[in-house]
Amino acid sequence: MKKILITGATGMVGIQVLEQLLQNENVSQIISIGRRKTGITNKKLKEIIHADFMNFSSLKEELINIDVCFYCLGVYQNQVSNTEYEKITCSYQKALTDILEETSPKATFVLFGAAGADPSEKSRILFARVKGKAENLLNSTKFHEKYIFRPGYIHPTGKRKPPGWSYKIGLPVFTILFKLFPSIGISDKDLAAAMIKVGLYPKFHSRVFENSQIRELLT
C-alpha cells in the first residue's frame, strides 16, 4: 500500500490525478499540500493548507515515508511576472524536493512538465528555459526514480479548466483539432492515468515521456 504526496491538486490535471488515486486500491493515504481545499472528502485524503511554498520545514513529520510524489503544481506564464513564474515553477519545486530528500529519500517523483522544455536552459523562450530548469533541478536530486511528463495540448474533460480569456476563445478550436488530430495532445484524464501508471507501477528507470510516449503508455 502506497503513501502518496500530491501538490497542485486543485488544478486541471492535479484534480484528475487525485480523483484516480483515491479510487486506486493500492493507495492507502494521500497527503495533499495546497493553498486551498479541493472540495473532496475521503478517508484516504489528508489536505494540508500551506501558505509558504518556499519553506516546508513545518511539514517534515507529514512527509516521512512518502512512496510517490505527484508534482502537479504550476502556473500559466501569462498570469504572473517572469520572476514569479520562475519562482513558482522552479523554486517551489526545489524547496519541496530538498526536504523530501531528507524525509523520504526512496520516493518516486513524478513531475507534470510540458512539451518544449529546454534542459539546456538556453532558449530565448522563457517558458522553455524555466521548464527546462525545473527538469534539471529534479534530475539533480537523489530520488531513486524520477519521471518527467511533457504533454502537448491537454484537453479538459472535468470541471476544472485553465483560466483566462485566451483559453475560452481557443477551446472550441482546439476541441475540433483534437478530435481530428488526437496525436497533438492528450486529455487531462488520460494524462493523469499515465502518470499514475508510471508512478505506482514503474517499469522504466527514470526517464522523460514526450507526448507520443505518454499516449503509448495507455495502449
Image: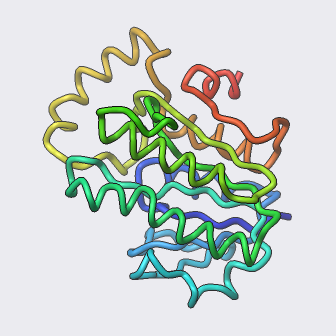
Residue drawn where x is 39% and y is 75% of the image = 35
Residue 132 at x, y percent in the picture = 48, 41
Residue 170 at x, y percent in the picture = 20, 28
**Foreground of the two, 18 or 39:** 18
Residue drawn where x is 30% and y is 41% of the image = 126
**Foreground of the two, 2 or 81:** 81
**Foreground of the two, 35 or 173:** 35
Horizontal placement of 11 versus 96: left or right? Answer: left
In this rendering, the answer to whether 119 lies above or below 60 is above
Horizontal placement of 188 versus 108: left or right? Answer: left
Figure coloring = rainbow
Disc tally is 0
In this rendering, the answer to whether 129 lies above or below 178 is below
Figure quadrant of the C terminus? top right
Residue drawn where x is 40% and y is 28% of the image = 153
Figure quadrant of the N terminus? bottom right
Q: Quadrant of residue 11?
A: bottom left
In this rendering, the answer to whether 59 lies above or below 197 is below
Residue drawn where x is 64% and y is 76% of the image = 99
Horizontal placement of 204 versus 83: left or right? Answer: right
Q: Quadrant of residue 44?
A: bottom right
Horizontal placement of 167 versus 134: left or right? Answer: left
